[in-house]
Amino acid sequence: MEKIKTDKVIIVEGKYDKIKLSSIVDAHIITTDGFALFNNSEKRALIRKLAERSGLVVLTDSDGAGFVIRNKLKGYVGNDCEIINLYAPQIVGKEARKNKASKQGLLGVEGIESETIRSLFEKAGITSDGKKSAVNYTKTDLYNLGLSGGSDSSSKRDEICEKNGLPRGMSANAFLAAVNLLGIVIDDK
């Protein structure tokens, strides 16, 4: 199968994630080495420069650590750079090379099927034909749909995430970006 091509830099957590993605995507892939990025000013500067030039695609594990890394990256590159967040589905299991499952018992990027990862890129419009989503919800739309600002907004977002293979526990802003990027139509019923 042909590799997906993109000029955007792809950020993943570790070397096994990079190996997995290298078989699917023809792009420059940088690892954060987990939280080591936080103490590596040279790598942060490189990521910032690359993000300014062509934008970033971030694909971290859909666990607490992955969300922390995503948020830190956003702070490092600033609001002027395009960041496309791809969210791996939360699949219970452990990678074949590991003796035990992760703390949350979920597969990381390296353990997810290649076709699932390929579909994440395609849904985000990162394909050789460059298709993009026409969905464009606003924060006001989320509020009007009861998906932000209400006492049960988080659980409503979680339901939509579960139906669409996104991780539960996304903030309203992350949810908005994912829905628009992936072209998910929200049923207001």
Image (tube, rainbow, N blue to C red):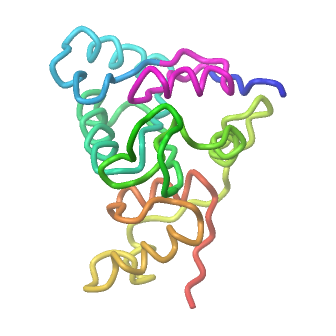
Q: Nearer the viewer, residue 63 or 128?
A: 63
- Residue 100 quadrant: top left
**Where 23 falls versus 112 (above or below)?**
above
Residue at the (49%, 52%) spot, across then down: 93
Q: Answer left or right for 163 relative to 31.
A: right
**Where 9 falls versus 62 (above or below)?**
above
Residue at the (23%, 29%) spot, across then down: 35
Total number of numbered labels? 0
- Magenta run includes residue 9: yes
Q: Residue 176's spot in the image, x, y percent?
A: 44, 60
Q: Residue 131's spot in the image, x, y percent?
A: 74, 42
Spot the residue most to the bottom.
189
Residue at the (67%, 52%) spot, across then down: 133
**Where 138 falls versus 62 (above or below)?**
below
For the C terminus, the image quarter is bottom right
Residue at the (51%, 65%) spot, across then down: 137
Q: Nearer the viewer, residue 149 or 38?
A: 38
Q: Answer left or right for 103 relative to 4.
A: left
Spot the residue most to the left.
39
Q: Residue 110's spot in the image, x, y percent?
A: 52, 34
For the N terminus, the image quarter is top right
Residue span colored magenta: 7-29
Q: Nearer the viewer, residue 56 or 106?
A: 106
Q: Residue 160's spot in the image, x, y percent?
A: 52, 73
- Magenta run includes residue 127: no
**Where 98 falls versus 101 (above or below)?**
above
